[in-house]
Amino acid sequence: MRQDPLIPMLAVVTDIRQDTPDVKTFRVVGLDGKKPLVHIPGQCAMLSVPGVGEALFSITSSPTNEEYLEFSIKKCGCVTDWLHAMEPGQQVTLRGPYGNGFPVDTDFAGKDLVFVAGGIGLAPLRSVINYVRHYRDRYGSVDIVYGSRSKADLVDYQEILDEWRREDGISVHLTIDNPQPDWDGHVGFVPNYVKELGFDTGKTVVMCGPPIMIKFTLAGLMEQGFPRNNIYTTLELRMKCALGRCGRCNIGDRFVCKDGPVFRLDQLDQLPDEY
Amino acid sequence: MKKYPVSQLDSLFAAIAAKQRLYIPAGEAKTAAFQPWEEGMRLTAALNTVRSAKDLFFPQVENLVNFKVTGKQIEVIENRDPAEPFVVFGVRACDCRSFEILDKVFLCDPVDTYYETRRACGTVVTLACTEPEETCFCTAFGIDPTDPAGDVSCWISGEDLYLRANTEKGEALLGGLEMLEEGGEPVTDKTVFDRLPLQNLPLDKFGGEHMMELFRRAEWAGLAESCLGCGACTFVCPTCQCYDIKEFNTGDEIKRFRCWDSCMYSDFTLMSAGQPRPTQLERFRQRFMHKLVYYPSTHDGEFGCVGCGRCLQKCPISMNIVKVAKTLGEEKP
Protein backbone atom coordinates (compact mmCIF):
# COMPACT_ATOMS: atom_id res chain seq x y z
CA MET A 1 0.00 0.00 0.00
CA ARG A 2 1.49 3.30 -1.00
CA GLN A 3 1.43 6.22 1.41
CA ASP A 4 -1.65 8.40 1.15
CA PRO A 5 -1.01 12.11 0.59
CA LEU A 6 -3.35 12.92 3.49
CA ILE A 7 -1.19 11.05 5.99
CA PRO A 8 1.35 13.47 7.41
CA MET A 9 4.90 12.97 8.54
CA LEU A 10 6.09 13.86 12.01
CA ALA A 11 8.25 16.88 12.67
CA VAL A 12 9.46 18.73 15.70
CA VAL A 13 9.48 22.42 16.56
CA THR A 14 12.98 23.22 17.74
CA ASP A 15 12.77 26.96 18.21
CA ILE A 16 10.05 29.57 18.67
CA ARG A 17 10.75 33.26 18.17
CA GLN A 18 8.29 35.95 19.25
CA ASP A 19 8.32 38.29 16.26
CA THR A 20 5.54 40.70 17.12
CA PRO A 21 2.83 40.71 19.80
CA ASP A 22 0.76 38.29 17.70
CA VAL A 23 3.29 36.66 15.35
CA LYS A 24 5.70 33.88 16.24
CA THR A 25 8.18 32.18 13.96
CA PHE A 26 8.48 28.40 14.37
CA ARG A 27 11.55 26.46 13.34
CA VAL A 28 10.67 22.93 12.23
CA VAL A 29 12.84 19.89 11.48
CA GLY A 30 12.11 16.23 10.83
CA LEU A 31 12.49 13.65 13.60
CA ASP A 32 15.98 12.94 12.21
CA GLY A 33 16.91 16.57 12.84
CA LYS A 34 17.12 17.40 9.14
CA LYS A 35 15.01 19.63 6.92
CA PRO A 36 11.81 17.63 6.37
CA LEU A 37 10.94 18.70 2.82
CA VAL A 38 12.25 20.60 -0.17
CA HIS A 39 10.21 23.55 -1.41
CA ILE A 40 10.07 26.48 -3.82
CA PRO A 41 9.64 30.02 -2.39
CA GLY A 42 5.92 30.71 -2.02
CA GLN A 43 4.90 27.10 -1.44
CA CYS A 44 2.96 26.06 1.65
CA ALA A 45 2.70 23.12 4.01
CA MET A 46 -0.01 21.66 6.23
CA LEU A 47 0.89 21.80 9.90
CA SER A 48 -1.23 20.08 12.46
CA VAL A 49 -1.45 19.30 16.09
CA PRO A 50 -3.61 16.18 16.45
CA GLY A 51 -6.66 16.98 18.51
CA VAL A 52 -6.52 20.66 17.63
CA GLY A 53 -6.62 20.73 13.85
CA GLU A 54 -4.67 21.11 10.64
CA ALA A 55 -4.04 24.33 8.73
CA LEU A 56 -2.03 25.51 5.76
CA PHE A 57 0.86 27.92 6.25
CA SER A 58 3.31 29.44 3.85
CA ILE A 59 6.88 28.35 4.34
CA THR A 60 8.74 31.45 5.44
CA SER A 61 12.28 30.18 5.18
CA SER A 62 14.14 30.11 1.90
CA PRO A 63 14.86 26.82 0.13
CA THR A 64 18.52 27.82 0.37
CA ASN A 65 18.31 27.17 4.09
CA GLU A 66 19.33 23.54 4.19
CA GLU A 67 18.88 22.95 7.90
CA TYR A 68 15.25 23.66 8.75
CA LEU A 69 11.91 25.14 7.73
CA GLU A 70 10.47 28.27 9.28
CA PHE A 71 6.83 29.32 9.53
CA SER A 72 5.83 32.81 10.66
CA ILE A 73 2.35 32.45 12.07
CA LYS A 74 -0.12 35.02 13.29
CA LYS A 75 -2.34 34.10 16.21
CA CYS A 76 -5.88 34.17 14.85
CA GLY A 77 -7.72 30.88 15.35
CA CYS A 78 -7.79 27.44 17.00
CA VAL A 79 -4.66 25.94 15.50
CA THR A 80 -2.62 29.14 15.66
CA ASP A 81 -3.68 29.81 19.27
CA TRP A 82 -2.41 26.37 20.20
CA LEU A 83 0.83 26.84 18.28
CA HIS A 84 1.43 30.13 20.06
CA ALA A 85 0.94 28.49 23.45
CA MET A 86 3.29 25.54 22.90
CA GLU A 87 6.96 25.16 23.76
CA PRO A 88 10.00 24.03 21.78
CA GLY A 89 10.42 20.28 21.58
CA GLN A 90 6.77 19.81 20.66
CA GLN A 91 6.11 17.42 17.81
CA VAL A 92 3.70 18.45 15.07
CA THR A 93 2.57 16.77 11.87
CA LEU A 94 3.57 18.09 8.48
CA ARG A 95 2.64 17.42 4.88
CA GLY A 96 3.49 19.20 1.67
CA PRO A 97 4.90 21.18 0.03
CA TYR A 98 1.81 22.44 -1.80
CA GLY A 99 1.21 24.98 -4.52
CA ASN A 100 3.11 26.44 -7.43
CA GLY A 101 5.43 28.90 -5.67
CA PHE A 102 6.93 32.02 -7.20
CA PRO A 103 8.68 31.73 -10.58
CA VAL A 104 12.04 32.58 -9.03
CA ASP A 105 14.12 30.72 -11.60
CA THR A 106 12.11 31.66 -14.69
CA ASP A 107 10.03 34.85 -14.86
CA PHE A 108 11.94 36.59 -12.06
CA ALA A 109 15.41 35.80 -13.42
CA GLY A 110 17.30 38.93 -14.44
CA LYS A 111 14.44 41.21 -13.38
CA ASP A 112 14.39 44.24 -11.10
CA LEU A 113 12.13 43.22 -8.23
CA VAL A 114 9.89 45.30 -5.99
CA PHE A 115 8.47 43.44 -2.98
CA VAL A 116 5.43 45.03 -1.35
CA ALA A 117 4.24 43.56 1.93
CA GLY A 118 1.89 44.49 4.74
CA GLY A 119 1.83 42.94 8.21
CA ILE A 120 2.03 39.14 8.23
CA GLY A 121 2.06 39.37 4.42
CA LEU A 122 5.83 39.46 4.66
CA ALA A 123 5.82 35.76 5.65
CA PRO A 124 5.54 34.23 2.16
CA LEU A 125 7.71 36.97 0.62
CA ARG A 126 10.54 36.41 3.10
CA SER A 127 11.19 33.06 1.45
CA VAL A 128 11.54 34.73 -1.96
CA ILE A 129 13.58 37.65 -0.63
CA ASN A 130 16.11 35.39 1.05
CA TYR A 131 16.27 33.19 -2.04
CA VAL A 132 16.98 36.25 -4.17
CA ARG A 133 19.61 37.43 -1.67
CA HIS A 134 21.29 34.02 -1.85
CA TYR A 135 21.45 34.09 -5.66
CA ARG A 136 21.91 37.86 -5.79
CA ASP A 137 23.68 37.98 -9.17
CA ARG A 138 20.73 36.32 -10.92
CA TYR A 139 18.48 39.33 -10.30
CA GLY A 140 18.52 43.05 -10.94
CA SER A 141 17.73 45.68 -8.33
CA VAL A 142 15.73 44.72 -5.25
CA ASP A 143 13.35 47.05 -3.41
CA ILE A 144 11.40 45.97 -0.38
CA VAL A 145 8.47 48.08 0.78
CA TYR A 146 7.15 46.79 4.05
CA GLY A 147 4.58 48.34 6.33
CA SER A 148 2.81 47.48 9.52
CA ARG A 149 0.48 49.02 12.09
CA SER A 150 3.38 49.90 14.39
CA LYS A 151 7.09 49.24 14.82
CA ALA A 152 6.31 46.32 17.12
CA ASP A 153 4.19 44.71 14.41
CA LEU A 154 6.98 44.53 11.84
CA VAL A 155 7.67 40.82 11.35
CA ASP A 156 11.33 39.81 11.04
CA TYR A 157 12.37 43.33 12.07
CA GLN A 158 15.70 42.13 13.42
CA GLU A 159 16.57 40.24 10.24
CA ILE A 160 15.54 43.26 8.18
CA LEU A 161 17.82 45.57 10.22
CA ASP A 162 20.77 43.22 10.62
CA GLU A 163 20.84 41.65 7.19
CA TRP A 164 18.57 43.06 4.49
CA ARG A 165 19.34 46.72 5.18
CA ARG A 166 23.08 46.20 5.19
CA GLU A 167 23.22 44.47 1.85
CA ASP A 168 24.37 46.31 -1.25
CA GLY A 169 21.82 46.52 -4.01
CA ILE A 170 18.85 46.01 -1.70
CA SER A 171 16.76 49.00 -0.69
CA VAL A 172 14.46 48.48 2.25
CA HIS A 173 11.61 50.97 2.67
CA LEU A 174 9.81 50.53 5.99
CA THR A 175 6.68 52.35 7.05
CA ILE A 176 4.25 52.26 9.94
CA ASP A 177 0.65 53.47 10.04
CA ASN A 178 1.01 56.11 12.78
CA PRO A 179 3.90 58.13 14.24
CA GLN A 180 5.49 56.85 17.43
CA PRO A 181 8.34 58.27 19.55
CA ASP A 182 10.97 55.60 18.83
CA TRP A 183 10.41 55.66 15.04
CA ASP A 184 12.27 58.00 12.74
CA GLY A 185 11.33 56.20 9.53
CA HIS A 186 8.47 56.74 7.11
CA VAL A 187 4.94 57.03 8.44
CA GLY A 188 1.91 56.23 6.29
CA PHE A 189 0.09 53.44 4.55
CA VAL A 190 1.86 51.08 2.15
CA PRO A 191 -0.14 52.01 -0.98
CA ASN A 192 0.74 55.69 -0.64
CA TYR A 193 4.36 54.92 0.12
CA VAL A 194 4.67 52.74 -2.98
CA LYS A 195 3.30 55.61 -5.04
CA GLU A 196 5.67 58.13 -3.42
CA LEU A 197 8.66 55.90 -4.12
CA GLY A 198 7.75 56.07 -7.82
CA PHE A 199 9.32 52.85 -9.07
CA ASP A 200 10.14 52.32 -12.71
CA THR A 201 7.15 50.61 -14.32
CA GLY A 202 9.43 48.01 -15.90
CA LYS A 203 10.06 46.43 -12.50
CA THR A 204 8.39 43.19 -11.43
CA VAL A 205 6.12 43.66 -8.43
CA VAL A 206 5.58 40.89 -5.86
CA MET A 207 2.86 41.65 -3.34
CA CYS A 208 1.34 40.11 -0.26
CA GLY A 209 -0.74 41.68 2.46
CA PRO A 210 -4.24 42.36 3.69
CA PRO A 211 -6.87 42.71 0.92
CA ILE A 212 -7.30 46.43 1.57
CA MET A 213 -3.56 47.03 1.06
CA ILE A 214 -3.54 44.97 -2.13
CA LYS A 215 -6.55 46.83 -3.46
CA PHE A 216 -5.15 50.30 -2.99
CA THR A 217 -1.58 49.43 -3.91
CA LEU A 218 -2.86 47.95 -7.14
CA ALA A 219 -4.89 51.04 -7.91
CA GLY A 220 -1.73 53.11 -7.49
CA LEU A 221 0.36 50.79 -9.65
CA MET A 222 -2.27 50.90 -12.40
CA GLU A 223 -2.27 54.68 -12.25
CA GLN A 224 1.50 54.68 -12.64
CA GLY A 225 1.26 52.35 -15.63
CA PHE A 226 2.58 49.00 -14.36
CA PRO A 227 1.53 46.17 -16.70
CA ARG A 228 -0.78 43.63 -15.03
CA ASN A 229 1.24 40.69 -16.31
CA ASN A 230 4.24 41.82 -14.28
CA ILE A 231 2.53 41.93 -10.88
CA TYR A 232 2.46 38.80 -8.72
CA THR A 233 0.56 38.06 -5.54
CA THR A 234 -0.11 35.06 -3.34
CA LEU A 235 -3.56 34.16 -2.06
CA GLU A 236 -5.02 32.35 0.88
CA LEU A 237 -8.36 30.57 1.11
CA ARG A 238 -9.64 27.94 3.49
CA MET A 239 -8.33 24.45 2.71
CA LYS A 240 -8.68 20.99 4.15
CA CYS A 241 -6.82 18.75 1.72
CA ALA A 242 -4.46 21.01 -0.26
CA LEU A 243 -4.84 18.50 -3.11
CA GLY A 244 -7.67 20.16 -5.09
CA ARG A 245 -10.36 17.80 -3.78
CA CYS A 246 -12.01 19.12 -0.63
CA GLY A 247 -13.68 21.81 -2.73
CA ARG A 248 -13.05 24.96 -0.69
CA CYS A 249 -10.28 26.97 -2.23
CA ASN A 250 -11.31 27.25 -5.86
CA ILE A 251 -11.53 30.59 -7.59
CA GLY A 252 -13.49 29.74 -10.68
CA ASP A 253 -11.86 26.70 -12.24
CA ARG A 254 -8.52 27.18 -10.45
CA PHE A 255 -7.59 25.83 -7.03
CA VAL A 256 -5.48 28.05 -4.81
CA CYS A 257 -3.89 24.96 -3.24
CA LYS A 258 -2.50 23.47 -6.43
CA ASP A 259 -2.84 26.03 -9.24
CA GLY A 260 -1.82 28.84 -6.82
CA PRO A 261 -1.26 30.26 -4.30
CA VAL A 262 0.86 32.49 -6.54
CA PHE A 263 -1.04 34.22 -9.33
CA ARG A 264 -0.15 36.96 -11.78
CA LEU A 265 -2.60 39.80 -11.87
CA ASP A 266 -3.55 39.16 -15.49
CA GLN A 267 -4.32 35.55 -14.52
CA LEU A 268 -6.62 36.71 -11.73
CA ASP A 269 -8.33 39.01 -14.20
CA GLN A 270 -9.56 35.88 -16.01
CA LEU A 271 -11.17 34.51 -12.84
CA PRO A 272 -14.23 35.43 -10.77
CA ASP A 273 -13.32 37.85 -7.97
CA GLU A 274 -14.27 35.40 -5.24
CA TYR A 275 -11.26 35.72 -2.92
CA MET B 1 -24.00 -12.58 -23.30
CA LYS B 2 -25.24 -14.71 -20.40
CA LYS B 3 -28.74 -15.04 -19.06
CA TYR B 4 -30.59 -16.17 -15.99
CA PRO B 5 -34.26 -16.34 -14.99
CA VAL B 6 -35.36 -13.23 -13.12
CA SER B 7 -37.58 -15.42 -10.93
CA GLN B 8 -34.44 -17.00 -9.48
CA LEU B 9 -32.47 -13.84 -8.76
CA ASP B 10 -32.24 -14.94 -5.11
CA SER B 11 -30.06 -17.88 -6.10
CA LEU B 12 -27.86 -15.64 -8.24
CA PHE B 13 -27.41 -13.17 -5.37
CA ALA B 14 -26.70 -16.04 -2.98
CA ALA B 15 -24.03 -17.39 -5.31
CA ILE B 16 -22.32 -13.98 -5.57
CA ALA B 17 -22.64 -13.32 -1.84
CA ALA B 18 -21.08 -16.69 -1.07
CA LYS B 19 -17.78 -15.37 -2.44
CA GLN B 20 -17.79 -11.67 -1.67
CA ARG B 21 -19.99 -9.04 -0.14
CA LEU B 22 -22.87 -8.08 -2.40
CA TYR B 23 -24.79 -4.79 -2.33
CA ILE B 24 -28.14 -4.43 -4.05
CA PRO B 25 -30.59 -1.53 -4.16
CA ALA B 26 -33.39 -2.57 -1.80
CA GLY B 27 -36.27 -1.02 0.10
CA GLU B 28 -39.32 1.12 -0.60
CA ALA B 29 -39.18 4.01 -3.06
CA LYS B 30 -38.73 6.69 -0.38
CA THR B 31 -35.97 4.83 1.45
CA ALA B 32 -34.32 2.65 -1.20
CA ALA B 33 -30.60 2.23 -0.62
CA PHE B 34 -27.70 0.03 -1.61
CA GLN B 35 -27.59 -2.52 1.19
CA PRO B 36 -25.54 -5.62 1.94
CA TRP B 37 -27.56 -8.46 0.51
CA GLU B 38 -28.94 -11.07 2.85
CA GLU B 39 -31.28 -13.99 2.36
CA GLY B 40 -34.71 -12.83 1.26
CA MET B 41 -33.71 -9.29 0.28
CA ARG B 42 -35.32 -8.21 -2.98
CA LEU B 43 -34.29 -5.65 -5.59
CA THR B 44 -36.15 -2.42 -5.01
CA ALA B 45 -38.99 -1.58 -7.34
CA ALA B 46 -37.81 2.04 -7.29
CA LEU B 47 -35.73 3.22 -10.22
CA ASN B 48 -33.11 4.93 -8.14
CA THR B 49 -31.88 4.75 -4.58
CA VAL B 50 -32.35 7.84 -2.41
CA ARG B 51 -28.61 8.25 -2.01
CA SER B 52 -26.32 7.45 -4.87
CA ALA B 53 -23.98 4.53 -5.29
CA LYS B 54 -20.94 6.76 -4.66
CA ASP B 55 -21.20 5.85 -0.95
CA LEU B 56 -19.52 2.53 -1.70
CA PHE B 57 -16.36 4.20 -3.02
CA PHE B 58 -16.50 7.52 -1.18
CA PRO B 59 -18.35 6.81 2.07
CA GLN B 60 -19.98 9.58 4.05
CA VAL B 61 -17.49 9.05 6.86
CA GLU B 62 -14.21 7.16 6.75
CA ASN B 63 -11.18 6.85 8.96
CA LEU B 64 -7.95 8.38 7.69
CA VAL B 65 -5.43 7.89 10.46
CA ASN B 66 -5.12 7.87 14.24
CA PHE B 67 -2.67 9.71 16.45
CA LYS B 68 -1.57 9.02 19.97
CA VAL B 69 -0.33 12.12 21.73
CA THR B 70 1.85 11.67 24.81
CA GLY B 71 3.31 14.87 26.19
CA LYS B 72 5.20 16.45 23.30
CA GLN B 73 5.35 13.18 21.36
CA ILE B 74 3.02 12.14 18.57
CA GLU B 75 2.57 8.64 17.23
CA VAL B 76 0.95 8.06 13.82
CA ILE B 77 -1.22 4.95 13.85
CA GLU B 78 -2.55 3.43 10.64
CA ASN B 79 -6.33 3.25 10.87
CA ARG B 80 -7.84 2.60 7.48
CA ASP B 81 -11.25 1.04 7.32
CA PRO B 82 -10.74 -2.51 6.05
CA ALA B 83 -11.48 -2.95 2.34
CA GLU B 84 -12.56 -6.29 0.93
CA PRO B 85 -13.68 -7.29 -2.54
CA PHE B 86 -17.34 -6.55 -3.12
CA VAL B 87 -19.92 -6.53 -5.87
CA VAL B 88 -22.48 -3.79 -6.29
CA PHE B 89 -25.44 -4.94 -8.36
CA GLY B 90 -28.09 -2.78 -9.96
CA VAL B 91 -26.17 0.44 -10.51
CA ARG B 92 -27.94 2.66 -13.03
CA ALA B 93 -26.16 4.19 -16.02
CA CYS B 94 -26.15 7.64 -14.40
CA ASP B 95 -24.49 6.45 -11.19
CA CYS B 96 -22.01 4.43 -13.21
CA ARG B 97 -20.99 7.56 -15.11
CA SER B 98 -20.58 9.35 -11.78
CA PHE B 99 -17.78 6.93 -10.91
CA GLU B 100 -15.86 8.11 -13.97
CA ILE B 101 -16.33 11.71 -12.85
CA LEU B 102 -15.15 10.93 -9.32
CA ASP B 103 -12.22 8.90 -10.69
CA LYS B 104 -10.88 12.03 -12.36
CA VAL B 105 -10.94 13.84 -9.02
CA PHE B 106 -9.58 11.14 -6.73
CA LEU B 107 -7.27 9.14 -8.99
CA CYS B 108 -5.26 12.01 -10.44
CA ASP B 109 -1.81 12.60 -9.00
CA PRO B 110 -1.34 12.35 -6.03
CA VAL B 111 -3.78 9.44 -5.89
CA ASP B 112 -6.28 9.27 -3.05
CA THR B 113 -5.46 5.76 -1.87
CA TYR B 114 -8.62 5.35 0.21
CA TYR B 115 -10.80 5.83 -2.86
CA GLU B 116 -8.38 3.90 -5.06
CA THR B 117 -8.53 0.86 -2.78
CA ARG B 118 -12.32 0.80 -2.77
CA ARG B 119 -12.46 1.17 -6.54
CA ALA B 120 -10.03 -1.70 -6.93
CA CYS B 121 -12.11 -3.85 -4.57
CA GLY B 122 -15.45 -3.16 -6.18
CA THR B 123 -17.02 -4.88 -9.17
CA VAL B 124 -19.77 -2.73 -10.65
CA VAL B 125 -22.76 -4.53 -12.13
CA THR B 126 -25.08 -2.10 -13.84
CA LEU B 127 -28.73 -2.50 -14.70
CA ALA B 128 -30.32 -0.96 -17.80
CA CYS B 129 -33.29 1.31 -17.22
CA THR B 130 -36.63 0.52 -18.78
CA GLU B 131 -38.99 2.91 -17.05
CA PRO B 132 -37.40 6.29 -16.28
CA GLU B 133 -38.83 8.79 -13.86
CA GLU B 134 -40.00 12.21 -14.98
CA THR B 135 -36.99 13.69 -13.18
CA CYS B 136 -34.48 11.71 -15.25
CA PHE B 137 -32.28 13.60 -17.69
CA CYS B 138 -29.16 11.48 -18.08
CA THR B 139 -29.56 11.53 -21.86
CA ALA B 140 -28.83 15.27 -21.77
CA PHE B 141 -25.27 14.29 -20.80
CA GLY B 142 -24.90 11.68 -23.52
CA ILE B 143 -25.66 8.75 -21.22
CA ASP B 144 -27.62 5.86 -22.71
CA PRO B 145 -29.69 4.44 -19.83
CA THR B 146 -30.50 1.34 -21.89
CA ASP B 147 -26.83 0.50 -22.36
CA PRO B 148 -25.05 1.15 -19.08
CA ALA B 149 -21.30 0.71 -18.63
CA GLY B 150 -19.66 -0.97 -15.63
CA ASP B 151 -17.72 -4.21 -15.19
CA VAL B 152 -20.87 -6.12 -16.05
CA SER B 153 -23.95 -4.69 -17.79
CA CYS B 154 -27.36 -6.24 -17.15
CA TRP B 155 -30.76 -6.03 -18.80
CA ILE B 156 -34.07 -7.39 -17.64
CA SER B 157 -35.96 -8.49 -20.72
CA GLY B 158 -39.02 -10.73 -20.60
CA GLU B 159 -38.46 -13.39 -17.97
CA ASP B 160 -34.69 -13.19 -18.04
CA LEU B 161 -31.79 -11.19 -16.72
CA TYR B 162 -29.13 -10.75 -19.40
CA LEU B 163 -25.54 -10.19 -18.31
CA ARG B 164 -22.58 -8.99 -20.34
CA ALA B 165 -19.04 -8.73 -18.96
CA ASN B 166 -17.20 -5.58 -20.09
CA THR B 167 -13.95 -5.87 -18.16
CA GLU B 168 -11.62 -8.52 -16.74
CA LYS B 169 -13.20 -8.00 -13.35
CA GLY B 170 -16.59 -8.56 -14.92
CA GLU B 171 -15.39 -11.72 -16.72
CA ALA B 172 -14.05 -13.06 -13.45
CA LEU B 173 -17.37 -12.47 -11.72
CA LEU B 174 -19.51 -14.08 -14.42
CA GLY B 175 -16.99 -16.89 -14.95
CA GLY B 176 -17.49 -17.90 -11.33
CA LEU B 177 -21.26 -18.15 -11.63
CA GLU B 178 -21.88 -21.59 -13.07
CA MET B 179 -25.67 -21.31 -13.07
CA LEU B 180 -25.60 -18.71 -15.90
CA GLU B 181 -26.65 -19.91 -19.33
CA GLU B 182 -25.50 -18.64 -22.68
CA GLY B 183 -28.11 -16.15 -23.83
CA GLY B 184 -29.16 -14.22 -26.89
CA GLU B 185 -29.82 -10.49 -26.88
CA PRO B 186 -32.22 -8.63 -24.62
CA VAL B 187 -34.95 -6.59 -26.26
CA THR B 188 -34.49 -2.91 -25.40
CA ASP B 189 -37.01 -0.19 -26.02
CA LYS B 190 -35.56 3.31 -26.21
CA THR B 191 -38.72 5.10 -27.26
CA VAL B 192 -39.78 5.96 -23.72
CA PHE B 193 -36.54 7.92 -23.25
CA ASP B 194 -37.28 10.07 -26.25
CA ARG B 195 -40.32 11.37 -24.40
CA LEU B 196 -38.52 12.43 -21.22
CA PRO B 197 -39.53 16.00 -20.39
CA LEU B 198 -36.11 17.24 -19.27
CA GLN B 199 -33.84 15.67 -21.86
CA ASN B 200 -33.29 18.74 -23.99
CA LEU B 201 -31.35 20.86 -21.55
CA PRO B 202 -29.72 23.86 -23.22
CA LEU B 203 -26.12 23.02 -22.29
CA ASP B 204 -24.33 24.64 -25.23
CA LYS B 205 -23.75 27.85 -23.30
CA PHE B 206 -21.97 26.08 -20.45
CA GLY B 207 -18.36 24.98 -20.11
CA GLY B 208 -15.14 26.73 -19.18
CA GLU B 209 -15.04 29.13 -22.11
CA HIS B 210 -18.14 30.92 -20.76
CA MET B 211 -16.94 31.13 -17.15
CA MET B 212 -16.83 34.87 -16.61
CA GLU B 213 -20.00 35.63 -18.52
CA LEU B 214 -21.97 32.96 -16.62
CA PHE B 215 -20.49 33.96 -13.27
CA ARG B 216 -21.67 37.51 -13.74
CA ARG B 217 -25.22 36.71 -14.84
CA ALA B 218 -27.80 38.69 -12.91
CA GLU B 219 -30.18 35.71 -12.79
CA TRP B 220 -28.18 34.04 -10.01
CA ALA B 221 -29.80 36.32 -7.44
CA GLY B 222 -33.27 35.11 -8.32
CA LEU B 223 -32.24 31.48 -8.63
CA ALA B 224 -30.50 31.47 -5.24
CA GLU B 225 -33.04 33.65 -3.47
CA SER B 226 -34.97 30.89 -1.72
CA CYS B 227 -32.10 28.44 -1.19
CA LEU B 228 -32.16 27.28 2.43
CA GLY B 229 -28.57 26.09 2.37
CA CYS B 230 -29.68 22.70 3.67
CA GLY B 231 -27.16 20.81 1.53
CA ALA B 232 -29.62 18.00 0.66
CA CYS B 233 -28.70 18.31 -3.03
CA THR B 234 -25.03 17.76 -2.29
CA PHE B 235 -25.66 14.73 -0.12
CA VAL B 236 -27.81 12.86 -2.64
CA CYS B 237 -25.62 13.93 -5.57
CA PRO B 238 -23.54 11.13 -7.10
CA THR B 239 -20.80 13.52 -8.22
CA CYS B 240 -20.48 15.87 -5.24
CA GLN B 241 -17.12 15.18 -3.70
CA CYS B 242 -16.37 18.05 -1.32
CA TYR B 243 -15.15 16.81 2.01
CA ASP B 244 -14.05 17.90 5.43
CA ILE B 245 -11.28 16.46 7.56
CA LYS B 246 -12.16 16.34 11.23
CA GLU B 247 -10.86 14.84 14.41
CA PHE B 248 -12.43 13.03 17.32
CA ASN B 249 -10.73 12.45 20.64
CA THR B 250 -11.59 8.95 21.78
CA GLY B 251 -10.00 9.66 25.13
CA ASP B 252 -7.14 7.39 24.22
CA GLU B 253 -6.32 8.41 20.67
CA ILE B 254 -7.15 11.15 18.20
CA LYS B 255 -9.12 9.74 15.31
CA ARG B 256 -8.74 11.81 12.14
CA PHE B 257 -11.55 11.13 9.69
CA ARG B 258 -12.94 12.40 6.43
CA CYS B 259 -16.61 13.17 5.98
CA TRP B 260 -18.77 14.68 3.29
CA ASP B 261 -19.16 18.42 3.40
CA SER B 262 -21.26 20.81 1.37
CA CYS B 263 -20.37 23.98 -0.52
CA MET B 264 -23.90 25.11 0.36
CA TYR B 265 -22.93 25.60 4.02
CA SER B 266 -22.00 29.02 5.32
CA ASP B 267 -18.90 27.89 7.23
CA PHE B 268 -17.52 25.89 4.30
CA THR B 269 -15.14 28.65 3.24
CA LEU B 270 -15.16 30.75 6.41
CA MET B 271 -11.69 31.92 7.48
CA SER B 272 -10.36 34.04 10.30
CA ALA B 273 -9.39 36.47 7.54
CA GLY B 274 -12.87 36.65 6.03
CA GLN B 275 -15.45 34.89 3.91
CA PRO B 276 -15.03 34.72 0.12
CA ARG B 277 -18.60 33.42 -0.34
CA PRO B 278 -20.50 35.57 2.16
CA THR B 279 -24.12 34.91 1.14
CA GLN B 280 -26.13 31.95 -0.14
CA LEU B 281 -25.97 33.48 -3.61
CA GLU B 282 -22.21 32.85 -3.85
CA ARG B 283 -22.55 29.36 -2.38
CA PHE B 284 -25.42 28.44 -4.68
CA ARG B 285 -23.58 29.81 -7.69
CA GLN B 286 -20.46 27.88 -6.72
CA ARG B 287 -22.30 24.55 -6.73
CA PHE B 288 -23.83 24.95 -10.16
CA MET B 289 -20.83 26.67 -11.70
CA HIS B 290 -18.76 23.72 -10.50
CA LYS B 291 -21.00 21.15 -12.18
CA LEU B 292 -21.59 23.06 -15.41
CA VAL B 293 -18.51 25.23 -15.87
CA TYR B 294 -15.52 24.61 -13.58
CA TYR B 295 -15.48 20.81 -13.83
CA PRO B 296 -15.89 20.81 -17.63
CA SER B 297 -13.22 23.48 -17.90
CA THR B 298 -10.59 21.21 -16.37
CA HIS B 299 -11.95 17.87 -17.67
CA ASP B 300 -12.19 18.17 -21.45
CA GLY B 301 -15.69 19.61 -21.45
CA GLU B 302 -17.27 16.76 -19.53
CA PHE B 303 -20.05 17.99 -17.23
CA GLY B 304 -20.05 17.22 -13.52
CA CYS B 305 -23.71 16.13 -13.57
CA VAL B 306 -25.17 12.80 -14.69
CA GLY B 307 -28.86 13.72 -14.73
CA CYS B 308 -29.96 11.21 -12.08
CA GLY B 309 -32.62 13.64 -10.90
CA ARG B 310 -32.11 13.05 -7.17
CA CYS B 311 -31.68 16.74 -6.40
CA LEU B 312 -34.91 17.47 -8.26
CA GLN B 313 -36.74 15.09 -5.96
CA LYS B 314 -35.11 16.21 -2.73
CA CYS B 315 -34.77 19.99 -2.84
CA PRO B 316 -37.27 21.45 -0.36
CA ILE B 317 -37.73 24.58 -2.46
CA SER B 318 -37.77 22.78 -5.81
CA MET B 319 -34.73 24.59 -7.10
CA ASN B 320 -32.33 22.48 -9.11
CA ILE B 321 -29.74 22.17 -11.84
CA VAL B 322 -32.40 21.86 -14.54
CA LYS B 323 -33.88 25.24 -13.64
CA VAL B 324 -30.40 26.75 -13.49
CA ALA B 325 -29.45 25.33 -16.88
CA LYS B 326 -32.71 26.47 -18.45
CA THR B 327 -32.56 29.95 -16.95
CA LEU B 328 -28.95 30.61 -17.91
CA GLY B 329 -28.72 28.49 -21.04
CA GLU B 330 -31.76 29.51 -23.03
CA GLU B 331 -31.70 32.28 -25.57
CA LYS B 332 -33.45 35.44 -24.43
CA PRO B 333 -36.66 36.07 -26.35
Image (cartoon, rainbow, N blue to C red):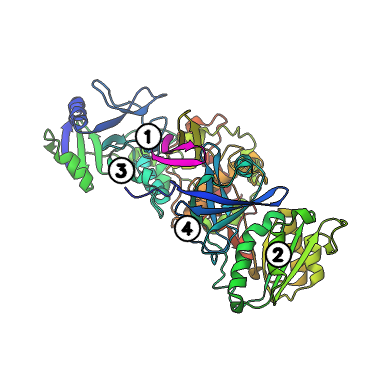
Mark 4–mark 2 distance (CA, rounded to whole Å): 26 Å
Classify mark 3: helix, strand or loop. Answer: loop
Residue closest to the far top? B40
| Residue at 18% across, 43% down | B172
Q: Are callouts 1 and 4 both on one chain? A: no
Classify mark 2: helix, strand or loop. Answer: helix
Residue B22 screen position, x and y as percent: 26, 31
Near mark 4 (Cα within 10 A), the count class, few <14, some 14-19 or many ≥20, is: some
From this view, report whether residue B172 is shown above or below residue B19.
below
Mark 4–mark 3 distance (CA, rounded to whole Å): 53 Å
Q: Is residue B63 magenta?
A: yes
Which segment did they paint magenta? B61-78
Q: Are callouts 4 and 3 both on one chain? A: no
Residue where numbered disc 4 is placed: A34
The numbered mark at residue B132 is: 1
Amino acid, disc 3? Pro
Taking depth in this image into account, of A95 and A24 the one nearest to the observer is: A24
Q: Quadrant of residue A161?
A: bottom right
Residue where numbered disc 2 is placed: A160
Near mark 3 (Cα within 10 A), the count class, few <14, some 14-19 or many ≥20, is: many
Residue where numbered disc 3 is placed: B148
Taking depth in this image into account, of B59 and A191 the one nearest to the observer is: A191
